[in-house]
Image: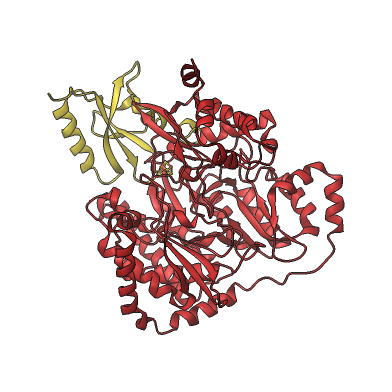
Chain colours: A red, B yellow
Amino acid sequence: MYVYNDFDENFVRNRVAQFRGQVERRIDGSLTEDEFKPLRLMNGLYLQLHAYMLRVAVPYGTLNSAQMDKLAYIADKWDKGYGHFTTRQNIQYNWPELRDVPDMLSALADVSMHAIQTSGNTIRNVTADHFAGAAADEIEDPRPTAELLRQWSTDHPEFQFLPRKFKIAVTGAEADRAVTRAHDIGLRMVRNDAGEAGYEVIIGGGLGRTPMVGKVLRDFLPRADLLPYCEAIVSVYNLLGRRDNKYKARIKITVHENGLEKIQDLVEARFEQIRPNFGGVDQQMLAQIEQAFAAPAFVTKSTDGYEAARLANPALRSWSDTNLSDHKADGYAVVSISIKKHGATPGDATSDQMRVMADLARQFGHDELRISHEQNVILPHVHKSDLPAVYAALRAADLATANIGLVSDIIACPGMDYCALATARSIPVAQEIATRFDELKLEHEVGPLKIKISGCINACGHHHVGHIGILGLDRAGVENYQITLGGDGTETTTIGERAGPGFGAEDIVPAIERLVLGYLNLRETADETFLQAYRRLGADPFIAILYPEKAAKNAA
Amino acid sequence: MARPFTPKVVTANALLEGDAIWFTENGDWSRDMADAELITDEAHGDICLLEAQADQSAVAGVYLADAKAGAHGPEPVHFRETFRTRGPSNYVHGKQEA
Ligand code: SF4
């Protein structure tokens, strides 16, 4: 993977030193809170309900074992022994003290990590397919592109004060696991008819208050044009994007209000203007970056032991059925480690668990780990013959929950347990749904189902693209949960539709149970997923299940 | 017609730990909401807020929050403020830890 060069290293170290001085000046009173706030946000430090929160970028979700070990060390030394993995492939620490933050950032810098541009109206951490470099359906590894974009966007002088935050996602596979259509810029690596590598460029997607599916701005952008073209997009947005109204400032609104064609014309014009300035340096850099992402030396060995262990151990079998995905190399598998044990907080890993995962990556995983936007951790390259050992170690660390892609593999944002912007809690709802379905012992029968929960309209929990989405609101001083149905965050991105009136905190879990059990009666075959059944039948039968009294009245 | 003033407290987060704190009658800060001054008069509320905001050395994010009189002192009205007196619901962390 990519290792910092001297320039990166100095840059990050200087920022830590600057921030250390800023913290000192805040504590001794020479900086007011109003002066300090933008400075701390530039370094990923938020003030939440009960404490500060430090958001650390995991660029395109890729970590090595030393980095994961360092995250564990930070959790123990300066936090409460755990970290929270987010839908932005970041990790958040919920309890740092102001005085310690510069030391935490310095520890991160030791392993080429930082918290820069994890906040503010800048280009944020570039996200990517969490199976990058491993997935069987991959056309090309998206991470070199993501790293190039990271280098270009970090401290880019023109783009530090955009109208609003700006998020870029990259995927290089057939299946879209990076939700590219819900980003300000989504890049899909494709090949044209001549077999040349390039990108499909999607813009103006986003969730939040006004959810929108991104639109294709260019169906084929030659690879060499990536940076000038992205720079053209962001620079057009920088001038055209609205600064008068925070809720209309994202590029999705700019595209919506101006029309795709006008944006296209402006971007193409700007692109022609700035392209000559790039002069190929970016492509030389990309070539160097690509070397850093060369695939590990995969080995060929027998998988007989694994097959035998699978037959002998039903728990291993069940886990391998749900938590493994196809790898591009023979004999290998992609392992998804569920950070969603039934009843636990989605995305929270203890420092001990982090160290176990780091060890497994070192021993069995070519030293690679990934964080998924679904708040799980991935070992992208594990040889099948090592799976029994990996499974046993995960099990010992309480990390072997066999639920990837099932009802209890819920995305939940921190909600009002931590987040200062929240209108309701999301974590307890996720915990209760998972616990309930574990009691029912039904989730394997229910099959693939994505439930996503946000604690406010900002939609960090991606509820709009959940097959079942749950949005926590404050209705007259009481927590209330609104359900959306039929959302989809993949290559067939769809925004879910609101089912009807919201449910109180006591009623939301029973409502979800009713809905899921009701689906079992509606599906044509055991293979028809919730989403497929919803698409075939439309919303009505599902709404009737959610609101039985209303349905009874209509029938009367 | 102007809406009647509902009682309030001045609250913030401690600068160093980020912990929730409340402004007291003596013009200092307490980690316990029950020690807060319950403000029942709008003009007085504005003064308290200004006074609290002027204290830049130890606090961040000062605001007025609705509150009501309880047996031991002011109590929260809204669930958000209740959570701030306690901590998160998924772990025994924050104030409830003590
Ligand atoms: S969706 Fe709202 S509550 Fe949840 S993390 Fe985002 S801002 Fe906070």
At 65% from the left and 71% from the top, the residue drawn is A295
Quadrant including the N terminus of chain A = bottom right
Q: Quadrant of residue A177?
A: bottom right
Whether residue A292 is visible, yes or no, is: yes
Which is more toward the observer, A99 or A250? A250
Q: Is A443 above or below relative to A488?
A: above
Q: Is A86 situated left or right of A16 in this image?
A: right
Which is more toward the observer, A395 or B50? A395
- If the picture is divided into quarters, which one holds ligand 1? top left
Whether residue B86 is visible, yes or no, is: no
Q: Is B42 situated left or right of A106 in this image?
A: left
Query: Which x, y percent locates residue A267?
Result: 33, 69
At 23% from the left and 23% from the top, the residue drawn is B6
Q: Is B34 above or below relative to A32?
A: above
Query: Which x, y percent locates residue A239?
Result: 25, 64
Q: Is B68 above or below relative to A483?
A: above
